[in-house]
Amino acid sequence: MIISKNSVVSFHYTLNDADGKVLDTSAGRDAFAYIHGLGMIVPGLERQLEGRKAGDSLLAVVPASEGYGDLDPSLVHKVPVDRFGGQVPEVGMQFQAGSEEGGEMGVFTVIGVDDGIVALNGNHPLAGVTLHFSVDVTDVREATADELAHGHVHGTGGHHH
């Protein structure tokens, strides 16, 4: 069976950046399972899995625009260190930040601390990154009516109740 809309696809993967650094892998865990065509995985990878079948291996190179998006400079903020209430942030620390109006702003990663000014990046950590997915497709099957109604995979590698 080939991968098409509403297939349940299981695969093992290793995700590297352009420099070969491992960002994520399913090694040692259950294969990752998703319903094809519902936008559950990054668009560039979903597109490259279309038409594949169980047993296929591929290296999918996904540009940032088809992955976690391009870097949005408007999501990089510089704030004085005194906003952190005596805590000195370090590069790589993550903060949940909300706006004054109580709106949810998301997670910010500290990307620089310089002279009392902290640079915070609100982009997804992989925004702007070209993704290199090494994928081994382990299983392809039809989604059940129940899975389609719920919008997620049940059982191994999927959603657990």
Image (cartoon, grey):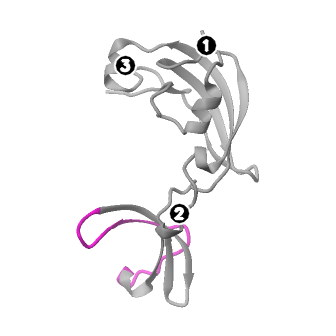
Tell me the kind of residue under disc 2: Asp
Give the residue pinned by disc 1. 2
Give the extent of the magenta segment.
84-103
Give the CA distance from mark 3 to mark 1. 18 Å
Q: Nearer the viewer, mark 1 or mark 2?
A: 2
Q: Nearer the viewer, mark 2 or mark 3?
A: 2
Q: Is residue 14 above or below residue 23?
A: above
61 left or right, relative to 28: right
Q: Residues within 10 Å of mark 3 (few under 14, many from 20)?
A: some
Q: Quadrant of the N terminus?
A: top right
**Relative to residue 78, is residue 67 depicted above or below?**
above
In what quadrant of the picture does the C terminus appear?
A: top left
Which residue carries the number 2 mark?
72
Is label 3 in contact with label 1 (beta carbons under 8 Å)? no
Q: Which mark is residue 147?
A: 3
Instruction: Report the predominant secondary structure element of the magenta stretch.
Output: loop
Q: Residue furthest left?
A: 101
* Label 1 CA crowd tier, 10 Å (few <14, some 14–19, many 20+): some
Magenta-span inclusion, residue 102: yes
Residue depicted at 64% across the width and 15% down the height: 54
Residue plotted at (72% across, 24% down) = 57
Bin the neighbour count of mark 2 within 10 Å (Cα to Cα): few under 14, some 14-19, many 20 and up: few
Q: Position of residue 80 (x, y in %)?
A: 43, 86
Q: Secondary structure at mark 2?
A: loop
Considering the numbered disc 3 on the image, is that residue within a helix, a strand or a loop?
Answer: helix
Q: What residue is rendered at 54% in x and 67% in y?
A: 92
36 or 85: which is nearer to us? Answer: 36
Residue 108 placement (x, y as % from top left): 45, 65
Point out the frontmost of discs 3 and 1: 1
Q: Earlier in the sequence, mark 1 or mark 2?
A: 1
